[in-house]
Image (tube, coloured by chain):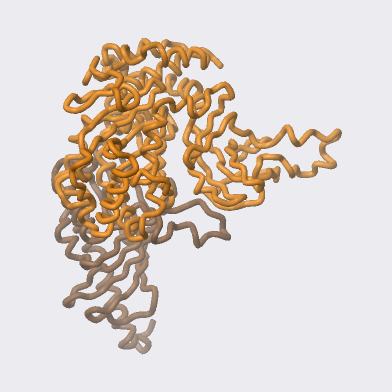
Chain colours: A brown, B orange
């Protein structure tokens, strides 16, 4: 790309994309460093945090390989429930994550679904990305959870927040014994 | 049937309340379980609402083996082994759906939804003389039962009827599955099945839901954070006094008895849900009278089907896939006639309680996982597990089915009944012997 084609709009897009990337990377650090209260601040109060299940379907029915929004999911939380999940870990007697697990979130393939170059307070933008969540606990227990994420981001008082998160794990029968971690 | 290489009764001492760790960790015993228990006992397959229309199918499991639950075009329900008669390929590889036939992707053998073989590649030329296709249909279970919409099956043609297999636990199962007002409105499944893998022996799970009321510390974290649907301390609303009921068929139910005159204020976080349950309670008092407050909380139908009847309401099957690996399949249910917003609130409460992301269930699985793991060592195996709580206390009860122990006495009688029956299945070859074992004043030996 030459300087001539680097329009103001393109620059604004790159600036916003870089801001989103830094937001996701900082979010991953908060989760992996267990700064859960700060992580909760990155979510809007009306967040929908949804992890549908996946099914074995035919190519013809490929639009049904993810459970619908009114179906049973792995997780379908509002902010209040996410706060409870954090508080549960903080009790120190949540045995599924006590002793604490070692977790790393890798976030990649980030893009905007629609062309966008600005995001003002109250506006929304939808992003897609891939996640790889690695968890190791006690001696040898290891999980590798990989999939796609669709996030709706908004801006509140100048700061990015997650207003909606759809987590699409690439497993049908879940190969991990629990989903104690956040995505 | 081959004979067992050991005596299960020597490993399970329900009179003393001591059970060998071998039965949870030993691969050879697990291989024997597959034959002695999972080819003989009645197993839960699914729910008729998963196959409402002709051609509908739902792929389930019996022990380790894949089976197809389907409704044929005459409306009859079948359960078939999901394996082609020709070369064994799975003939159905989708979780659920609707089809006119199951066509094998390997050599194109094709079966109707009643299991009949209707298509064989190059049948006219390759098979001279032609073979009889009616002898090469899908393998069907020996017996199937539809009980209040739940579908059960066994591979054993000599097994007793499903009703006899349930025994007196029928009452508890009826109470657990019926509409919350005790009337005829019925219940329905609430969406898709959660399936996940837990590194544990399947019996830890079955035992847990048969009525292990001593594992409260497992759930201390959710009690502290007020997971319950009223926002009070605890993970459920007040359900009354606990009672365990054990049955000679190996089933175990943990009942709760709520005082009829006490006000009920459940689900306070959702006014419409709270109002619905209060209406139900008023109708339940009218419908059931003195028995209104008596309801199963959790239960296990031997060997591996468990249910929660109150908060949340769910069905669970613990499909073994190895001595130390189990697939949990959990589905949820609600009153058919509950308003949409009530179903919606319950759906969200159920999901945050149960399943792999359920804040309550997560801690169970950690304990089952590492209890199994820490029992596998050669030294560990030499020490039996301790099942002595409430030993000798259980007795027949005038109002409740089975053998009963009531609060304030806590009891591990239900796991003892479960393992006594487990040993019967493992040691006894015939159903006559199994019948005798369950009727010879069993409760004196295990209560």
Q: Residue B404: x and y, percent?
A: 28, 23
Left or right of A132? Residue B127 is right
Q: Is residue B152 above or below residue B108?
A: above
Indicate the quadrant containing the N terminus of chain B: top left, top right, bottom left or bottom right: top right
Q: Residue A46: x and y, percent?
A: 24, 67
Q: Nearer the viewer, residue A4 or B73?
A: B73
Query: Which corner quadrant of the image does residue B381 belong to?
Result: top left
Q: Is residue B323 above or below residue A29?
A: above
Query: Which corner quadrant of the image does residue A50 belong to?
Result: bottom left
**Is residue B196 in sight in this rendering?**
no
Q: Is residue B315 above or below residue B143?
A: below
Q: Tell me what residue is drawn at x 59 percent, y 32 percent.
A: B141
Q: Tell me what residue is drawn at x 19 percent, y 73 percent.
A: A159
**Is residue B22 in sight in this rendering?**
yes
Left or right of B331? Residue B371 is left
Q: Residue A25: x and y, percent?
A: 25, 63
């Amino acid at each position: 790309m030459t300087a001539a084609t680097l329009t103001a709009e393109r620059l604004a897009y790159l600036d916003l994309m870089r801001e989103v990337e830094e937001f996701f990377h900082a979010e991953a650090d908060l989760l992996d460093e267990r700064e859960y209260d700060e992580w909760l601040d990155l979510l809007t109060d009306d967040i929908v945090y949804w992890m549908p299940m996946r099914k074995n379907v035919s190519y013809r029915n490929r639009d049904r390989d993810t459970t619908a929004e009114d179906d049973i999911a792995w997780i379908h939380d509002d902010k209040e429930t996410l706060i409870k999940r954090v508080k549960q870990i903080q009790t120190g007697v949540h045995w599924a994550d006590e002793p604490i697990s070692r977790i790393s979130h890798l976030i990649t393939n980030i893009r905007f679904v629609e062309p966008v170059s600005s995001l003002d307070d109250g506006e929304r933008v939808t992003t897609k990305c891939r996640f790889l969540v690695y968890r190791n606990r006690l001696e040898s227990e290891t999980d590798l959870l990989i999939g796609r994420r669709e996030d709706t981001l908004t801006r509140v008082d100048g700061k990015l927040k997650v207003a909606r998160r759809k987590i699409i794990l690439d497993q049908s029968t879940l190969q991990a014994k629990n989903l104690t971690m956040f995505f | 049937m081959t004979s067992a290489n050991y005596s299960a009764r020597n490993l399970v001492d329900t009179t003393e309340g001591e059970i060998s760790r071998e039965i949870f960790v030993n691969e050879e015993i697990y291989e024997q379980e597959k034959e002695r228990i999972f080819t003989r006992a009645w197993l839960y397959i699914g729910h008729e609402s998963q196959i409402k229309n002709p051609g509908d199918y739902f792929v389930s499991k019996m022990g380790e083996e894949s089976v197809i639950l389907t409704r044929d075009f005459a409306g009859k329900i079948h359960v078939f082994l999901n394996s082609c008669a020709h070369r064994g390929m799975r003939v159905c590889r989708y979780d659920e759906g609707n089809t006119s036939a199951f066509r094998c992707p390997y050599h194109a053998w094709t079966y109707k939804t009643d299991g009949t073989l209707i298509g064989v590649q190059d049948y006219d030329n390759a098979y001279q003389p032609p073979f009889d296709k009616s002898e090469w249909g899908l393998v069907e279970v020996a017996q199937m039962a539809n009980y209040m919409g739940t579908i059960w099956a066994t591979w054993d043609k000599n097994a007793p009827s499903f009703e006899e297999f349930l025994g007196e636990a029928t009452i508890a199962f009826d109470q657990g599955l019926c509409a919350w007002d005790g009337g005829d409105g019925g219940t329905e499944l609430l969406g898709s099945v959660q399936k996940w893998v837990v590194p544990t022996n399947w019996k830890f799970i079955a035992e847990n839901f048969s009525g292990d009321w001593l594992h409260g510390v497992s759930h201390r974290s959710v009690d502290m954070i007020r997971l319950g649907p009223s926002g009070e301390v605890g993970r459920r609303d007040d359900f009354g006094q606990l009672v365990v009921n054990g049955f000679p068929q190996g089933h175990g139910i943990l009942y709760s008895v709520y005082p009829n005159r006490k006000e009920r204020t459940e689900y306070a976080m959702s006014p419409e849900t709270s109002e619905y349950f209060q209406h139900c309670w008023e109708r339940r008092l009218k419908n059931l009278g003195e028995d209104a407050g008596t309801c199963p909380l959790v239960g296990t139908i031997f060997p591996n089907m468990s249910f929660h009847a109150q908060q949340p309401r769910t069905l669970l099957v613990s499909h073994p896939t190895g001595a130390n690996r189990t697939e949990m399949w959990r589905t949820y249910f609600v009153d058919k006639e509950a308003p949409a917003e009530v179903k919606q609130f319950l759906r969200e409460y159920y999901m945050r309680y149960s399943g792999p992301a359920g804040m309550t269930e997560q801690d169970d699985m950690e304990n089952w996982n590492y209890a199994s793991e820490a029992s596998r060592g050669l030294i560990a195996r030499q020490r039996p597990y301790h099942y002595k709580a409430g030993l000798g206390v259980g007795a027949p009860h005038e109002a409740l089915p089975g053998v009963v122990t009531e609060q304030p006495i806590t009891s591990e009688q239900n796991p003892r009944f479960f393992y006594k029956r487990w040993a019967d299945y493992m040691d006894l070859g015939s159903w006559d012997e199994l019948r005798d074992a369950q009727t010879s004043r069993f409760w004196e030996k295990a209560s």
